[in-house]
Every structure is written in structure tokens, then in C-alpha cells.
């Protein structure tokens, strides 16, 4: 099985050929959004960082997203006086061989002139991207993430284990697969450690979940929304069991932190809980925070399960929506790519739905738009965080 | 972690042999009778799809087991056939937040 990807000057291969327009502080958000608006159905997407103060994590996230394999070019929109290191970001994007442009609103002469300048550049760059070379791309070059959002008690029974089956198929073919949300793996740490490639990695996994439990305990709130309880989930442990099912049955090869690109195929746990003292508030202020982090790890696409009925998509990479609950699917079919609730109704087996997700994933990688993509969903969020580098046991080379 | 492949049409799923709760795969009415792992259970409450009920008596303070793993603790005695949720069980880790009970934690965990 071979795909056809977009070949970037840095050698990476994407499944989409988009342009990101990124605001570097909230004060530049409106201008960036207005620049995107007329091009929003032509692969031009809005991302950004609201904060005025520099932060190593958000800088790394921006670098990874602006040089993501699905990203063909980047337009940076700055107010001018914010703390973001725009020069360094511009330099990184240019060094990757991607067209890049910086519009500084204060230098350009305000809102109207900045929008005009940005749109002129987009118009010309879209044309330039038409000539992006195509290249053969193996399944082993794919990076895929998995996420659950708007979970209910059916998520862990149908959609999550079915996505886990799709992960198993991908890992067999040496794709890199990322599962995450250590805050929703609380209670699962020893089960996960048993699946680690090495005992040392197993210890690191237990430590990351312990960090998550401490973090949420300090904040006084688990990664648990009232809708989870309405949907029949009673505790974070129960939600964790369901969330854990997304990882499938493969051996766990390593740990990543947001923005770390996996160096080989295999199954990775993304540790998205900040290191050190509890700072900056909740680590996942909503589902898109982690979706953006997996995309920053290079995810070409993300499988997203929902029982309650989430409608979100994402900037940069397509989201495949797998609906866990048969009642929700009937109500919201327009937003759902896969009806995994058929498993509960006895109309399909787990393996059948897992295979269906895998097949769809290949079609999406070859260009088929997902439901959320076609509906124009491009949610994105990025907040402050701080991380320390990974320990040596977290890398697959240690295996 | 064990997974089931397909439901058997009974409307009930026991996910692992030692589980003390079963999951509804269809809306189950109060008063209806279901057989779970060879035992007859009369439902004391209605149970919606994906929600759970006790398959045997669970004493206050003992663990609720789903998929063979503990998902929390009974905070009062639970009868066989009773709906199991935030009113009769709690997390061993972090409190559960719902909007129903006055926008506050249903139960503070020590």
C-alpha cells in the first residue's frame, strides 16, 4: 500500500497542502482571521497564540505547526510589540524551505493595510503551492494520533477499542501512532507499564501518570466534564479505562512530549502534563489543546471518538470522527465519519469497525475530506505550558 | 485489557468475569429481568445505553469492578439490579463534577 504525499523541501511528506496564518498575540487575531476568511475553503487555516509573554513550549508548538508536513507555507501576523520571538519563527519556517511571510501590523500601518498585504501574499502563495511536488509515501511514513472527546460510557465500549484496532493495523505496518491524555489514564498505569518495550520505559510511564494525578489533584478537578457523568461515566478511573482502549494492544515503544516528532514507527504515549510546579492552569483546557499537540508531534491525521457528540475538527490535520453511541449517531450523522455504535447494536464486530476506520484513514490520507473538514471546522487552541526534556528511557532507541 | 467483539442481543454486557457491574447495550426498563453470567437480576431502576447496574450486592466500601479493574468505591450498600452511578459510588482518585447537584463536587475525595 503506497500513498501519494506532498513533498516538502525538508524531505517530509504531507497529506494536505495548506497554508497556516498565525497570529502571534491576541491583538493580531482579528487581522489574521480576516486574512483567512475569503480563503477558508481553499486550505488556508487560522492558528495562533494569544499570550503576550514568550514561552518556550508555545514557541516550539508554533515552529512544529508552521513546518508541519501538511503545511505548505506560513503567514505570521504580529501586532509588533508582543513578546513572541517572531524573527526566530520566521527563520525556522524559511529554513524548512517553505514560503513564509511576516506582517507586522504596527509597521504595515494598521488593520486594513495588514489584511490587504496578507491576502495578496496568500493569493500568490496558493498559486505557488499548486506546483508542490508529489511523492510516494509508505504507511510507515504516516503519523496518526487518537483522541476522545465528549465521551460517554459507550466510548470505551465501541469507538475507542475500534480505534485501538485501527492503531494495531497501523503499528503492524510501522506507522507511528500517538495516544495521549495521561490525565485520562489515571488508574491504567500498571497495565500500560506491562506493555512497555523496556522495564525502564514502564517506570517512566508510571511516573507520567503519577505526575498527571498530582497535577489534577492540585487543580481540584479531574479531566472530567458533567456530560461524561450524564453519559454514564461515574469516575475518572472509569473514563480512563475507556480512554485507554484507544491505544490498542501493541507494545508501547516510547513517550513523547508535545512537539516531539517520533523517530521511528510504533506506539507512543504523549505526556501532555507540564513538568515542575503546577503553573498556568489546566493542562488540557479543551479537546483541541491535545489535538494541536499531537499534530505538533507530526500527526498527519487524528482519529477522534465521541459518545456525547463532539463536532470539532482541527487546523492543519484532518480529524476522523468515530461516533461511539448509536443514539448520538442517529442525531448527528452529518458530523460523524464512522458509526461505531453498530457494535452495541450487534450489527458489526469490533474488528470490522476497526478495519473500516483504517480503510477510511487511508482514503483521507489520499485526499478524501472528512466530515469536519468538509463542514469547515478548524478549531485550534494553544496555551502556556512548561516542559523538561524527556529522559533517555523514553526513546525507542533505548529498546 | 479484554474487549468484546459483538453483543449477543440480550441488552446486557458483562465485560469481564469478575465484574460486579454489567453494562446496558440497550435501554433497560425498571422491573425487567436479565440473566447475567447465569444469575437472574431484576433491575431496580431504568438503565440507559452504556450505563451500568450491579449484578450482585455490593457492600459500602468495596470496589466497583468493570473490565476486571476497579473504577471506584461503593459509598453505600448497593443491591443487585440497582443503577450504579455518582449517587452510590465515588472515585478513589479525584472527585466527579456534575451540574445536577448544585454546580459542585458531588463528593469530596480525601
Image (cartoon, helix red, strand yellow):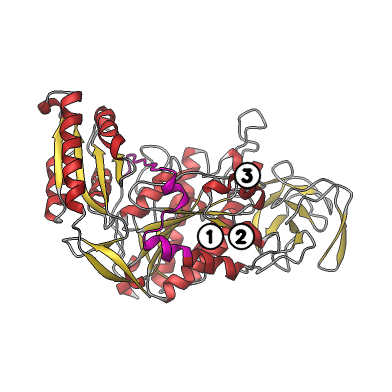
Q: Is residue B60 magenta?
A: no
Coordinates of residue A324 in the picture (x, y in percent): 60, 54
Among the two numbered marks 3 and 1 on one chain, the one whose residue lies closer to the N terminus? 1
State the SS at label 1. helix
The magenta region covers A360-385
Callouts 2 and 1 in the same chain: yes
State the SS at label 3. helix
Q: Nearer the viewer, residue B32 or A359?
A: A359
Query: Which residue is tagged 1?
Result: A244
Q: Chain of mark 2?
A: A
Q: Chain of mark 3?
A: A
Question: Where is A327 relative to B34, above or below?
Answer: above
Query: Which residue is tagged 3?
Result: A331
Q: Residue at x 11, y 48 (%)?
A: A91
Among the two numbered marks 2 and 1 on one chain, the one whose residue lies closer to the N terminus? 2
Q: Is residue A178 visible?
A: yes
Amino acid at each position: 500500500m503506497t500513498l501519494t504525499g506532498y513533498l516538502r523541501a525538508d524531505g517530509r511528506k504531507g497529506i494536505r497542502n495548506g497554508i497556516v496564518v498565525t497570529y502571534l498575540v491576541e491583538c493580531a487575531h482579528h487581522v489574521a482571521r480576516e486574512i483567512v476568511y475569503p480563503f477558508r475553503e481553499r486550505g488556508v487555516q487560522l492558528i495562533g497564540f494569544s499570550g503576550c509573554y514568550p514561552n518556550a513550549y508555545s514557541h516550539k508548538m508554533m515552529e512544529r505547526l508552521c513546518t508541519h508536513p501538511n503545511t505548505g507555507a506560513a503567514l505570521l501576523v504580529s501586532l509588533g510589540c508582543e513578546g513572541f520571538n517572531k524573527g526566530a519563527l520566521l527563520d525556522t519556517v524559511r529554513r524548512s524551505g517553505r514560503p513564509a511571510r511576516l506582517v507586522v501590523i504596527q509597521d504595515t500601518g494598521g488593520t486594513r493595510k495588514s489584511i490587504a498585504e496578507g491576502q495578496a501574499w496568500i493569493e500568490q502563495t496558493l498559486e505557488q503551492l499548486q506546483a508542490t511536488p508529489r511523492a510516494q509515501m509508505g504507511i510507515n511514513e504516516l503519523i496518526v494520533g487518537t483522541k476522545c472527546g465528549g465521551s460517554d460510557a459507550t466510548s470505551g465500549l465501541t469507538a475507542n477499542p475500534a480505534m485501538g484496532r485501527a492503531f494495531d493495523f497501523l503499528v503492524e505496518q510501522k506507522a507511528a501512532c500517538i495516544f495521549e491524555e495521561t490525565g485520562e489514564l489515571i488508574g491504567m498505569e500498571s497495565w500500560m507499564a506491562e506493555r512497555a518495550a523496556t522495564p525502564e520505559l514502564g517506570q517512566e510511564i508510571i511516573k507520567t501518570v503519577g505526575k498527571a494525578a498530582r497535577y489534577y489533584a492540585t487543580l481540584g478537578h479531574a479531566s472530567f466534564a458533567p456530560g461524561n457523568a450524564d453519559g454514564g461515566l461515574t469516575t475518572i478511573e472509569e473514563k480512563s479505562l475507556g480512554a485507554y482502549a484507544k491505544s490498542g494492544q501493541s507494545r508501547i515503544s516510547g513517550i513523547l512530549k508535545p512537539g516531539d516528532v517520533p523517530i521511528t514507527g510504533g506506539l507512543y504515549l504523549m505526556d501532555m502534563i507540564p513538568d515542575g510546579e503546577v503553573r498556568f492552569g489546566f493542562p488540557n483546557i479543551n479537546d483541541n489543546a491535545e489535538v494541536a499537540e499531537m499534530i505538533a508531534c507530526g500527526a498527519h491525521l487524528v482519529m477522534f471518538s465521541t459518545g456525547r457528540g463532539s463536532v470539532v475538527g482541527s487546523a492543519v490535520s484532518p480529524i476522523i470522527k468515530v461516533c461511539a453511541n448509536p443514539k448520538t449517531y442517529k442525531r448527528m450523522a452529518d458530523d460523524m465519519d464512522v458509526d461505531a455504535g453498530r457494535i452495541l447494536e450487534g450489527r458489526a464486530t469490533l474488528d470490522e469497525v476497526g478495519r473500516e476506520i483504517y480503510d477510511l484513514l487511508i482514503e483521507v490520507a489520499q485526499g478524501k475530506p472528512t466530515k469536519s473538514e468538509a463542514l469547515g471546522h478548524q478549531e485550534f487552541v494553544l496555551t502556556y505550558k512548561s516542559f523538561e526534556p524527556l529522559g533517555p528511557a523514553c526513546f525507542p532507541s533505548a529498546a | 485489557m479484554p474487549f468484546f467483539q459483538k453483543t449477543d442481543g440480550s441488552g446486557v454486557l458483562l465485560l469481564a468475569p469478575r465484574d460486579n457491574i454489567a453494562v446496558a447495550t440497550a435501554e433497560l426498563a425498571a422491573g425487567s429481568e436479565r440473566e447475567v453470567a447465569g444469575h437472574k437480576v431484576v433491575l431496580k431502576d431504568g438503565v440507559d445505553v452504556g450505563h451500568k447496574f450491579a449484578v450482585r450486592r455490593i457492600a459500602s466500601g468495596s470496589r466497583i469492578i468493570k473490565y476486571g479493574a476497579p473504577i471506584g468505591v461503593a459509598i453505600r450498600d448497593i443491591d443487585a439490579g440497582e443503577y450504579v452511578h455518582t449517587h452510590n459510588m465515588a472515585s478513589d482518585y479525584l472527585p466527579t463534577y456534575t451540574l445536577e447537584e448544585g454546580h459542585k463536587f458531588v463528593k469530596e475525595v480525601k
